[in-house]
Image (spheres, grey):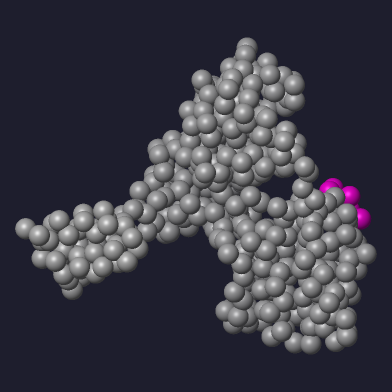
Amino acid sequence: MPLELNARDADFAARFDALVKSKRDAEADVGATVAAIIADVRARGDEVLHELNAKFDKVDSRKLGLRITQEEIDEAAAQVDGTTLAALETAAIRIRQFHARQMPADDMFTDAQGVTLGHRWTPLAAAGLYVPGGKAAYPSSVLMNAIPALVAGVERVAVCVPTPGGELNPLVMAAFKLIGIGEVYRTGGAQAVAAMAYGTESIAPVDKITGPGRDYVVTAKRMVFGQVGIDNPAGPSEILVVADNKNDPAWIAADLLSQAEHDEVAQSVLITDDAAFAASVGKAVKKQLASMPRGNIAAASWERFGALITVKDLQDAPALIDRIAPEHLELAVEDSATLARAVRHAGAIFLGRHTPEAIGDYVAGPNHVLPTAGAARYASGLNLLDFMKRTTLVQCDERSLRAIGPAAIALAEAEGLPAHARSVAIRLES
């Protein structure tokens, strides 16, 4: 049964604290295996990719080639029906428009001492995208990861995708074709991450790796961090819905299950000020589970990690929300904007009764790659700036160096770094 909490109960604080601290992503201990794979790829390059393709995906990439040709991409993409392709195009347009508005501006100014200061933004030279293969087909994830890089001006976007049985997923290939990505490699797992980080004979190294994956991929991304940049390693999906009793319980149940169907360790939480409404939502969840295609997965998530929380007043919700720091937050209440202003920690906020979280997964425009497991306390969702760097600029002339140089000399001497002091002082002696 999902957890049922009521703020009026004496043990509410303790039980809510246990909910916040509960661990859902029982991460497999794959560190040693992943480290060995990374070392092997660095030592033997393509040969490791061929061997593991044959072992795990039953693919002869020596014969087919590691790189998926444009002809193969086009042929697979042609299998996608017109309606789905049009939906992908709608999503791509909206994602591109939203992220284009994030483009930062360079800045230069001269301060009162005559020092010219500023900063400039430049895109990364190369980004790598990991795309899951097999039964998991998420073309929306391709769009969400690749489009910000392209809008930022990244010149090279390389993709690794496993192809179990040698099959190319038509939806994923259609997404590649739609946004113009042609550098795609048939390889997955930790070996793909290692190849993008360090390079092989066929795959040139990149500067940053993003994209979802399971234990081996997430662990590999953590291990190559420093050699390359990475996005936030994602944990199980989660949603927190704040709703009053003016909502249709079936709508809220559908929203909760939209995340529960992702994974057995996903989490769906409702906060409401009406215990009877919470009970109605619970019944609606049970009813919808009976007819869901992914009902077994969603039921496991709901039974183990779901929660129905009743508070005295919805104004008490923000404090609880900030404790959880959810990936997705729905505010299905009358004045959602006011409530949202009281929330500090959430990956993405969906305002009002007609804004289900699922709209954000596909076509709203903001990125659906969001911080999970409480990381919204310190992290943001994937965005344009993840694919850009800010470089600061400083220029002194003789007058401005004389104005601020003595302070630099004094600080350098205080820190016991005389060469630092001398490099400034020598210019002031003439």
Q: What residue do we see at 72% from left, 42% from top? A: 215
Q: Which residues are magenta?
A: 290-296
Q: Is residue 231 above or below residue 408?
A: above
Q: Main secondary structure of the magenta part?
A: loop
Question: Where residue 415 sits in the image (x, y, percent)?
Answer: 35, 63
Q: Quadrant of the C terminus?
A: bottom left
Let me know if residue 231 appears in the view.
Answer: yes
Q: What residue do we see at 61% from left, 41% from top? A: 223
Q: What residue do we see at 73% from left, 53% from top? A: 236
Q: What residue do we see at 67% from left, 79% from top? A: 318
In front of the other: 201 or 77: 201
In this picture, residue 48 sits left or right of residue 57: left
Q: Quadrant of the N terminus?
A: bottom right
Question: Where residue 146 sits in the image (x, y, percent)?
Answer: 52, 43
In this picture, residue 344 sits left or right of residue 417: right
- For the image, the number of numbered tags is 0
Question: Where residue 379 sits in the image (x, y, percent)?
Answer: 57, 61
In front of the other: 368 or 323: 323
Q: Is residue 197 above or below residue 356?
A: above
Q: Is residue 294 magenta?
A: yes
